[in-house]
Amino acid sequence: MPELPEVEVTRRGIAPHLVGRAIAAVAVREPRLRWPVPRAVGALAGRRVRAVRRRGKYLLLDCGDGHLILHLGMSGSLRLVDEGSAPGKHDHLDIAIGRQVLRLRDPRRFGAVLWTTRPPEEHPLIRHLGVEPLSRALDGRRLHALTRGCRVRVKPFLMDARRIVGVGNIYASESLYLAGIDPRRAAGRLSAADCARLAAAIKRTLRTAIRAGGSSLRDFVGSDGAPGYFQRRAWVYGRAGEKCRRCGTAVRKIVQGQRATYFCPHCQR
Ligand SMILES: [Zn+2]
């Protein structure tokens, strides 16, 4: 599933090809995505893309009088292809800009293509999203405030998009390892110092993943799953029974909220 780093890599990859350019044509080959693609999307030709922003895992194409909201769902990817390149079976949407086509491929069709003329931050899908982990808004102080009174364990806390948006399963385990925090601790019991380390660890983990995805920026953007380079170099994720890279203790795997959590019982307290 594309996570925040993949979506950010996608944004950085496509933005230079879209911003300032006019949409020549839009082809909606399959409108039955997670929600029906609105008719307005098919009528975007002539509008100029002013900016490509991201909120959580949503990409927002600012078209002046409205925003195209894109979500990659479980299996979606966005790719820039040359005009005239034949679409495949799962290529559901094309946005032609200049001599290129921004093409959405989504085999499982859990992705979304929506249009809003209201401020996108007020959209029902976006309104309730929590703080952006890579923004300045998330620091130790903010994290400490967010966790007060929370009995939920810190790992599922990090993955709750209403609190902090876009920290997926892999990144939650990796961040807690870097911060030296046991994933089973109650979020509300973290100290101010714990929260300062954890906020920094979240940013470091996500930035590392974005950098790892950067090598694929040129013509292919977006992917299924985490960037392979990052997974191979994970501190704990997917390494149950293997030696902790710092202390040699066997990495443990537990299940929290039906998701696998990996941690080092020696390094994380
Ligand atoms: Zn260790």
Image (cartoon, helix red, strand yellow):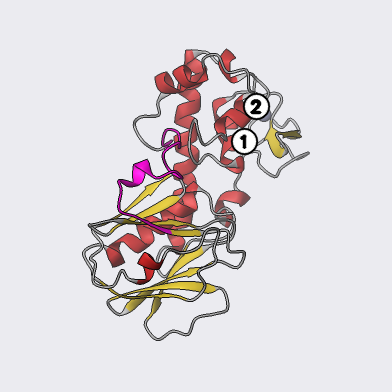
48 or 172, nearer to the observer: 48
Is residue 116 left or right of 259 when viewed as pictured? left
Is residue 22 left or right of 258 when viewed as pictured? left
Q: Position of residue 265 (x, y in %)?
A: 71, 25
Q: Is mark 1 within 8 Å of ligand 1?
A: no
Extent of the magenta region: 114-133
243 w.r.t. 37: above or below: above
Give the residue type that dot 1 points to.
Ser
**Distance CA(mark 2)–CA(mark 1):** 8 Å
Q: Residue at x 47, y 45 (%)?
A: 208
Rate crowding at label 1 as few (under 14), some (14 to 19) or many (20 or more) other CA atoms within 10 Å: many
Residue with the mark numbered 1: 173
Give the residue type that dot 2 points to.
Pro
Q: Which quarter of the picture shows residue 27?
A: bottom left
211 or 105, nearer to the observer: 105
Q: Which image quarter has ligand 1?
A: top right
Q: Residue at x 28, y 73 (%)?
A: 45
Q: Position of residue 55 (x, y in %)?
A: 40, 45
Badge number at residue 76? none
156 or 128, nearer to the observer: 128
Q: Residue at x 58, y 20 (%)?
A: 187
**Magenta portion: prevailing SS class:** loop
The quarter of the rendered structure image containing the C terminus is top right
Q: Is mark 2 within 8 Å of ligand 1?
A: no
Q: Position of residue 222 (x, y in %)?
A: 49, 61
Residue with the mark numbered 2: 183
Q: Secondary structure at mark 2?
A: loop
Query: Quick check: marks 2 and 1 in contact, CB under 8 Å?
Result: yes
